[in-house]
């Protein structure tokens, strides 16, 4: 009984979201290296976005960040007793390009760690690297490659989007597995097949959600996916619908699957779950507003606060980078 209580306590320390590594899973050396790479890449992305971003694209960064944050709260059950959710790297990449997508994903992952204790602070650089850099790079390369082969018709876009989403999840998961192996947390022969197997299934859900979102966008605003992004988001309709979708996802969050997520399941199976460390501080842990008796309402209120924060950060980053590169405007 005591052993079961210890395991349950450790489970509470883990993120409720897939691929968000908690403190304690990675070595100091791996964490520092991930921070260096992530800071360098995010810095470069900031410069590129400042050069490339159009004025009408600024709201879309905030909307996409909010929608991805909300989507990550809604876990879906997959085979094998685990669950997954939208990571969103592929969708952000397809709609906004890789540099803006890196900033969108970085904003989401950082707010999750800082405000909601979703993923550790010491390993935040690794979580940014896995989801905002590896996930976006994989999605971009696969999407562009498959699109050239399949053609830029609607069917080709959907196939490319599904493929990009699936591979972004798989490669991000393999990146986590390699970090665990190098850190000495789990042997590569165990971590790699376990993470790959679970997230290959989760990636199917990611691909279907991404393809569904692209199908909807193609039916109402196909110009958002065209190669000429100069007209992106020229009407309020696009970002109002996107923000309302984020709110709807948050309201549905209490219905999310309670099954363990991919990383949590692997940690339990391989046996390194006991290495998870408690957060350095708590603000809104586990996406529950402290002091609210109704857990569903506490989750919804935390989610609404989260999408407002992420929306503001996304717009703030986009506006400041654009203004900084256009001082005369």
Image (spheres, rainbow, N blue to C red):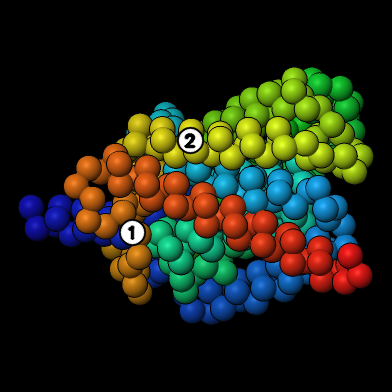
Q: Residue at x 81, y 66 (%)?
A: 323
- Read off the residue under disc 1: 285
The residue most toward the left is 1
Q: Is residue 96 visible?
A: yes
| The C terminus - image quarter | bottom right
Mark 2: which secondary structure?
A: helix
Q: Residue at x 46, y 71 (%)?
A: 121
Q: Residue at x 71, y 49 (%)?
A: 59
Residue 155 location, quadrant: top right
Residue 104 location, quadrant: bottom right
Q: Is residue 110 left or right of residue 319?
A: left
Which x, y percent locates residue 6? 18, 59
Nearest the eye: 264 or 233? 233
Q: CA distance from mark 2 to mark 1?
A: 19 Å
Nearest the eye: 169 or 197? 169
Which x, y percent locates residue 141? 80, 46
Few, some or many C-alpha atoms within 10 Å of disc 2 (few <14, some 14-19, many ≥20)?
many
Which x, y percent locates residue 66? 57, 47
Q: Is residue 257 visible?
A: no
Few, some or many C-alpha atoms within 10 Å of disc 1 (few <14, some 14-19, many ≥20)?
many
Q: Is residue 26 shown above or below 272?
A: below
- Read off the residue under disc 2: 249
Which x, y percent locates residue 203? 57, 36
Q: Is residue 262 shown above or below 207?
A: below
Q: Is residue 177 shown above or below 160?
A: below
Mark 1: which secondary structure?
A: helix
Q: Is residue 219 left or right of residue 243?
A: right
Q: Residue at x 39, y 55 (%)?
A: 15
């Amino acid at each position: 009984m005591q052993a079961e209580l210890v395991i349950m306590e450790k489970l509470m320390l883990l993120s409720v979201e897939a691929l968000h590594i908690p403190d304690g899973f990675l070595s100091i050396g791996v964490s520092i290296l991930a921070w260096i790479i992530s800071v360098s890449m995010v810095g470069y992305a900031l410069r590129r976005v400042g050069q490339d971003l159009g004025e009408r694209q600024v709201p879309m960064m905030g909307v996409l960040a909010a929608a991805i944050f909300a989507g990550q709260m809604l876990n879906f059950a997959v085979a094998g007793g685990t669950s997954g959710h939208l990571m969103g790297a592929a969708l952000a990449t397809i709609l906004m390009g890789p540099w803006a997508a890196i900033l969108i994903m970085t904003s989401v992952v950082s707010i999750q760690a800082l405000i909601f204790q979703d993923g550790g602070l010491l390993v935040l650089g690794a979580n940014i690297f896995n989801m905002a850099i590896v996930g976006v790079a994989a999605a971009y390369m696969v999407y562009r490659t498959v699109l050239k082969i399949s053609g830029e018709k609607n069917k080709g876009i959907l196939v490319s989007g599904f493929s990009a989403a699936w591979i972004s999840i798989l490669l991000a998961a393999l990146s986590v597995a390699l970090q665990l192996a190098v850190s000495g947390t789990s042997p590569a022969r165990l971590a790699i097949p376990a993470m790959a197997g679970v997230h290959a299934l989760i990636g199917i859900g990611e691909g279907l959600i991404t393809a569904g979102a692209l199908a909807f966008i193609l039916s109402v605003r196909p110009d958002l996916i065209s190669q000429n992004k100069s007209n992106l988001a020229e009407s309020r309709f696009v970002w109002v619908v996107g923000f309302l979708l984020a709110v709807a996802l948050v309201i549905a969050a209490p219905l999310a699957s309670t099954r363990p997520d991919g990383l949590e399941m692997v940690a339990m199976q391989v046996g390194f779950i006991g290495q998870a460390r408690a957060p350095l501080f708590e603000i809104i842990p586990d996406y529950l507003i402290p002091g609210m008796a109704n857990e569903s309402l506490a989750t919804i209120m935390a989610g609404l606060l989260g999408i407002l924060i992420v929306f503001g950060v996304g717009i703030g980053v986009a506006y400041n980078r654009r203004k900084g590169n256009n001082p005369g405007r």
